[in-house]
Amino acid sequence: MDRNEMKTLLKAQQGELDAVLMYNALADKVRDAQDAETFRRLAAEEGRHAAVFRNLTGRTLRPKKTLAVLVPVLYRLIGRKRLYPVIARFEYAAAKTYEPVTAVFPEAQSVKDDEKRHGDAVTALLQ
Ligand SMILES: [Fe+2]
């Protein structure tokens, strides 16, 4: 693995760890029980993703709380109808970001597929 690949994987690993905290914090905050259940499931899956990247990098990272603080505040300020599409867009963007990663690290394929599903799952909460 070259230096750039390592950098990409560490960034991915950090993003997944941060997403675990973010989804759990959001699950704590949302009023709708189905939303909460979905976000807990996504948090667990992001945790699995972080483990996939940890196995590739061999590094243990600390989750950052920034999104876990910000996103519940946004939920309160702008509401689920405006927030969830933003979250879905982030998930679809992650799927796209992981596309070139899967070419080099096939382990990331299921992670990429999950992010697309996450985007769909968050979108479906509003339907
Ligand atoms: Fe993920």
Image (tube, grey):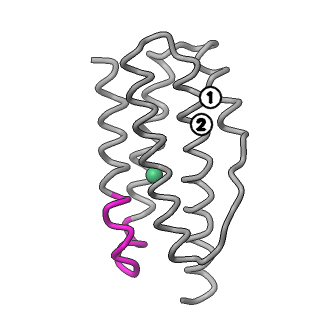
SS state under label 1: helix
The chief SS type of the magenta part is: helix
Q: Residues within 10 Å of mark 2 (few under 14, many from 20)?
A: many
- Residue 87 is left or right of residue 109, and the answer is right
- Residue 34 is left or right of residue 57, and the answer is left
Q: Which mark is residue 6?
A: none
Q: Quadrant of the C terminus?
A: top left
Q: What whole-number distance in Å separates the C-alpha atoms at marks 2 and 1?
A: 7 Å
Residue type, label 1: Val
Q: Quadrant of the N terminus?
A: bottom right
Seen as rendered, the residue at the extreme top is 31
SS state under label 2: helix
The verdict on residue 49 being magenta is no
Measured along the vertical axis of the image, is residue 95 above or below residue 23? below
Q: Which mark is residue 22?
A: 2
- Residue 31 is left or right of residue 14, and the answer is left
The verdict on residue 100 being magenta is yes
Measured along the vertical axis of the image, is residue 63 above or below residue 125? below
Residue closer to the observer: 93 or 37: 37
Q: Which residues are magenta?
A: 99-112
Kindly identify which residue carries mark 1: 71
Does the CB distance between marks 2 and 1 fall below 8 Å?
Answer: yes
Q: Position of residue 24 (x, y in %)?
A: 55, 33
Residue closer to the observer: 116 or 60: 60
Residue drawn 72% across and 39% down? 66
Residue drawn 39% across and 81% down? 104
**Among numbered discs 2 and 1, the one appearing first in the sequence:** 2
- Residue 49 is left or right of residue 57, and the answer is left
